[in-house]
Image (tube, rainbow, N blue to C red):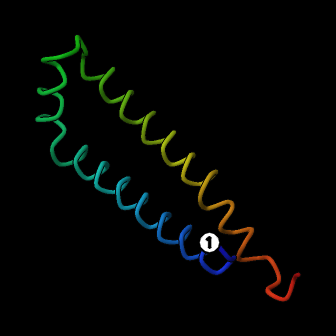
């Protein structure tokens, strides 16, 4: 895999993961009560715990995207193209 393919892969991966994050956020905002009812059947959670878990998980997921996808992509984009 050459650098151009790697850049394209990371760019598509970045877009796909942010799409997942946006869908998750949208579901949390617009269908929070339904998701809470579903999860409260399985786990003994109150609303504050439920919100905290989702907020923390979204933050960790976003940090992972930035650390493992956006960071390497930025490095590859800033690298000179004529490097050996």
Q: Residue furthest top?
A: 44
- In the visual, does 63 lie left or right of 24? right
Q: Quadrant of residue 22?
A: bottom left
Q: Residue furthest front?
A: 1
Q: Quadrant of residue 57?
A: top left
Look at the picture and state if 31 lies above or below 41: below
Q: How many marks do you count on the picture?
A: 1
**Label 1, on which residue?**
6
Q: x%, y% of residue 84?
A: 88, 81
Q: Nearer the viewer, residue 72 or 22?
A: 72
- In the visual, does 9 lie left or right of 23? right
Look at the picture and state if 75 lies above or below 21: below
- In the visual, does 29 lie left or right of 78? left
Q: x%, y% of residue 6?
A: 62, 71
Residue at the spot x=11%, y=26% of the render?
A: 37
Neighbour tally class for label 1: few under 14, some 14-19, many 20 plus, Cα within 10 Å: some
Residue at the spot x=25%, y=15% of the render?
A: 45
Look at the picture and state if 6 lies above or below 83: above
- In the visual, does 48 lie left or right of 62? left
Residue at the spot x=80%, y=77% of the render?
A: 79
């Amino acid at each position: 895999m050459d650098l151009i393919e790697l850049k394209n892969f990371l760019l598509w991966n970045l877009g796909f993961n942010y799409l997942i994050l946006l869908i998750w956020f949208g579901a949390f905002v617009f269908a929070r009560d339904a998701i809470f009812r579903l999860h409260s059947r399985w786990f003994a959670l109150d609303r504050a715990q439920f919100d905290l878990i989702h907020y923390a998980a979204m933050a960790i997921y976003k940090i992972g995207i930035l650390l493992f996808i956006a960071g390497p992509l930025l490095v590859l984009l800033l690298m000179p193209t004529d490097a050996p």
